[in-house]
Image: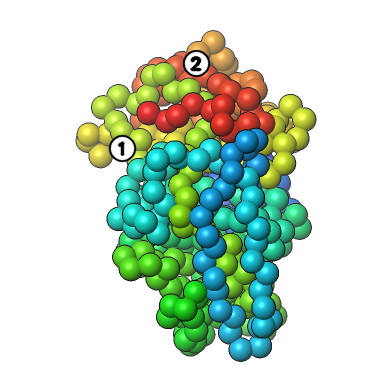
Amino acid sequence: MIEIESTVAAALREDEQRPVRADGLHERALARARVIRGRRRVLGAAAGTGLTVAMIAGLVAVNGLARGGSAVVADPPAGAPAALPVPPREPTTLPRAEGVPGAADAPSAVGTDARVLHFDLALAGLDVVSAEWTSAPGYERVVASTDSGSSPTEVLIGRDPARLDEVAVAPTSFVTGRETRAGKPEPTTVGGRPATLVRHSLLGRDDAYGWVLSWQPVDGLYARVRVVDDKSSTAFVAARALRLHVAQRCTVPLLVQTPPANATLTDCMTAVRRRPVPVRGVWMHSLLTYTTDRGGHPRIWAEEDLPRAGIDTSQFVPNTTAGGHPAMWRTREPRGLWVLGFDPAGELFIDGTSRSESIRVAGGVSVVGDLADPSTWPTLG
């Protein structure tokens, strides 16, 4: 169940005096630009009690595209393995942004263009099956998930450490949504540069830990690795997997022919699997956020078509059409246009703007490219 499905169902269940979640699509996407929950609830890897999110979003190997650049070398703390494996070069996870320097070569460019991710993450050693990439004002992020879903890894880079702290949460809250206690920062190094490691523990428990590793990979660039694991060495493995000399395109399998009026694209989030599945390919979901000249934030959310529980379809009551598809305009939170049967993408949800504008925007959205090959997806305008 995706975020919007969950929130729609929860909002309607309020009428029946049943428990609801307080975290809507609009709140998470706009306030934190964080991960939108997928249907796979096995993860429990979210940033709040109601955020039982599947932060899965896979890393796809695009045929014919080679990854370049070198890994950041992390120095393990006392008690960690003496030697951490250096991941081999692998196919890039998203299409390369040809001619665009990576974060290490142009730190001032990080978080300035929603269409570009100025880094990559190697998969070896992380047991990653999926990842969600975000490029937003002031930061760029990847949240990678393992096959079990028990230990999501978040990597953030940006020019302002305060901005990174603003958009992230304590790693144990990241999973449980409960209050955490941060330990004393421990000095360490990453790639020979000063770093700090902080352990976060769940209040009232001694067996739930998260780690935050912070450092400056190069002058003018800050990085955060946040993991949930009983061993701090996992954070250093993730840091070693960070590649800062390459850039990727943040791309989605959608052509937005009629974007929100008087607006520019400011945030791109897209989630892909490492390996394709039949019909649905590697794409999982995407969120495009725009900013209008009056400060509005229209958003276009799309998700793959998956079997859905009966509660989902029962909440969908079409009262209009958009681009020839049945649609539901919701006047209660989450307020917006919900479009089902948007094959092969599955569904759309547009919010942050008026009903007529939402219908107009949805009418110009189409699925373009091979869902199994991000290199065929359109370049964002």
Q: Quadrant of residue 43?
A: bottom right
- How many neighbours does mark 2 have within 10 angstroms: few (below 14), some (14-19), or many (20 or more)? many
Residue type marked 2: Ala
Per the model, the C-alpha gap separating discs 1 and 2 is 22 Å
Residue type marked 1: Thr
Q: Quadrant of residue 60?
A: top right
Place of residue 219 in the rendered image (x, y in percent of width and height, measured from the top left): 33, 68
Q: Nearer the viewer, residue 230 or 244?
A: 244
**Image: 46 above or below 193:** above
Residue at left offset 31%, top offset 33%: 264
Residue at left offset 62%, top offset 36%: 64
Q: Nearer the viewer, residue 158 or 1?
A: 158
Number of labels in the image equals 2
Q: Which mark is residue 95?
A: none
Q: Name the residue under label 1.
A: 291
Disc number lying in front (1 or 2): 1
- Position of the C terminus, as image quadrant, is top left
- Position of the N terminus, as image quadrant, is top right
Q: Nearer the viewer, residue 252 or 295?
A: 252
Residue lying furthest top in this view?
324
- Label whose residue precedes the other's in the sequence (1 or 2): 1
Report whether 91 appears left or right of 243: right
Residue at left offset 59%, top offset 80%: 76
Q: Which mark is residue 322?
A: 2
